[in-house]
Image (cartoon, rainbow, N blue to C red):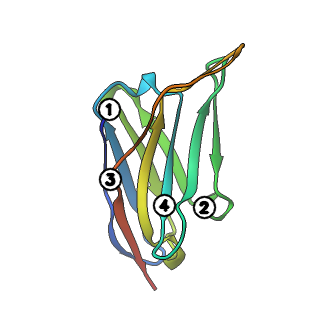
Amino acid sequence: VQLVESGGGLVQAGGSLRLSCAASESISRFGDMGWYRQAPGKQREFVVTVITEATGDTRTNYRDSVKGRFTVSRDNAKNTMYLQMNNLKPEDTAVYYCNADTSKRTNRGIVRGYNYWGQGTQVTVSS
C-alpha cells in the first residue's frame, strides 16, 4: 500500500489549504485513518483520526488546537482522504503525514493488520 500526500505549500496566516492523501488501494480496507504532523525539533503529533468501530460506524477525533478549523473527509471512489485546513496559524507549520491502518475492530477485539505512512507534505504558514 502506498499513501501519497499532496496539497502542501506556503500560505499566510488566516489562509487555507487542502491536503490530499491518495491511496494505491481501496481506502475501505482501512480500519483507521488519520493525519499527523511534525514540526522541526518536535515529535510527531496527531491532528485528526477517523476511527472505525466494530459496528462500522466511524468516530472522528481532532486535536484541540485544530477543532473548528480543520475538517477531514474521505472519497472512497477516489481512494483519497482530505484535510481541509482553514484559518491557518503559524503554529500549524509542519510536515503533514497521512496514516492508514488495516487493523479492524470486531466484537471480539482488534484483528491486527499493517500500518502505513505517506512521505509527508510541507505546510508553512507565515505570520
Quick one: 31 or 73, which is closer to the camera? 31
Amino acid at the residue labelled 4 = Arg
Inter-mark Cα distance, 3 to 2: 22 Å
Mark 4 surroundings: few (<14), some (14-19) or many (≥20) residues within 10 A:
many
Is tag 1's residue or tag 4's residue first in the polypeptide sequence? 1
Point out the frontmost of discs 1 and 4. Answer: 1
Is tag 4's residue or tag 2's residue first in the polypeptide sequence? 4
Amino acid at the residue labelled 3 = Gln
Question: In this view, which residue lies farthest toward the bottom?
Answer: 127
Which residue carries the number 1 mark?
Answer: 1
Which residue carries the number 3 mark?
Answer: 119
| Spot occupied by residue 99 in the image (x, y as percentages of width and height) | 45, 44
Which residue carries the number 4 mark?
Answer: 37
Mark 2 surroundings: few (<14), some (14-19) or many (≥20) residues within 10 A:
some
| Spot occupied by residue 62 in the image (x, y as percentages of width and height) | 63, 51
Inter-mark Cα distance, 4 to 3: 11 Å
Amino acid at the residue labelled 2 = Val
Is 108 left or right of 25, judged from the image as shown?
A: right
